[in-house]
Image (tube, rainbow, N blue to C red):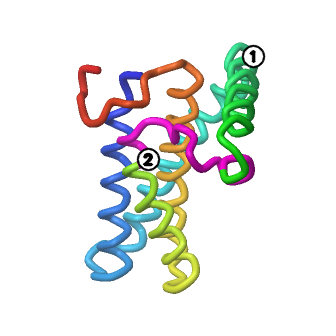
């Protein structure tokens, strides 16, 4: 998937914008709202394309069946939370974990809606990209090599 690096860059940029808005008050809420709409539109478009493609849906079902089988083989700790299973693309996981943490902080502690929406949209975009990469069978052991 050639959009892997741009999606990761959108996630990192969204994280920096949200942090600047939440902690430094350096970015206006209107700019954050516009960024949230743009990133949310990209995430929604990717979601709609994936949902409307029947081949993609069948591939997701096959992927889920494979992961359930792997979880059964690995034991009790993998069944419910999916621990010990391959998480997906390492770059996108590395970007999505801080996005998730900051989303929880923004929603629960700081209560600032525009930054929370931006972080949710960026997390959704990264999550959809990870699902698409896993479904397409892309290698998950690569790190930051843009040509892999």
Secondary element under disc 1, as helix, strand or loop, is helix
Q: Which residues are magenta?
A: 78-93
Identify residue for label 1.
54
Q: Position of residue 9 (x, y in %)?
A: 31, 44
- Of the 4 image quadrants, the one containing the C terminus is top left
Q: What is the CA distance from the residue labelled 2 to the residue labelled 1?
A: 26 Å
What residue sits 37% from the left and 50% below the top? 94
| Number of residue marks | 2
Q: Earlier in the sequence, mark 2 or mark 1?
A: 1
The image quadrant of residue 111 is: bottom right
Label 1 near label 2: C-beta < 8 Å? no
Q: Is residue 82 magenta?
A: yes
Q: In the figure, 116 relative to 23: above or below?
A: above
Q: Is residue 111 magenta?
A: no
What residue sits 54% from the left and 59% below the top? 120
What residue sits 60% from the left and 41% below the top? 44
Secondary element under disc 2, as helix, strand or loop, is helix
In this view, the residue in front, 98 or 18, is: 98
Label 1 neighbourhood size at 10 Å, few (<14), some (14-19), many (20+)? few
Q: Mark 2, mark 1: which one is toward the viewer?
A: 2
In this view, the residue in front, 22 or 34, is: 22
Residue 93 is tagged as: 2
What residue sits 23% from the left and 29% below the top? 145
Label 2 neighbourhood size at 10 Å, few (<14), some (14-19), many (20+)? some
Q: Position of residue 84 (x, y in %)?
A: 56, 45
SS majority, magenta: loop
Furthest-top residue in this view? 55
Tell me: 42 left or right of 72: left
């Amino acid at each position: 998937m050639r959009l892997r690096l741009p999606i990761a860059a959108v996630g990192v940029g969204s994280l920096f914008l949200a942090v600047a808005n939440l902690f430094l008050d350096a970015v206006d809420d209107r700019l954050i709202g516009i960024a949230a709409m743009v990133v949310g539109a990209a995430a929604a478009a990717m979601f709609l394309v994936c949902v409307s493609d029947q081949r993609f849906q069948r591939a997701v079902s096959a992927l889920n069946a494979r992961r359930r089988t792997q979880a059964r083989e690995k034991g009790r700790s993998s069944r419910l939370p999916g621990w010990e299973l391959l998480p997906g693309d390492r770059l996108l996981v590395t970007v999505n974990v801080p996005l998730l943490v900051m989303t929880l902080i923004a929603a629960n502690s700081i209560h600032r809606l525009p930054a929370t929406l931006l972080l949710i949209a960026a997390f959704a975009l990264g999550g959809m990209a990870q699902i698409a990469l896993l479904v397409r069978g892309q290698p998950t052991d690569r790190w930051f090599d843009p040509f892999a």
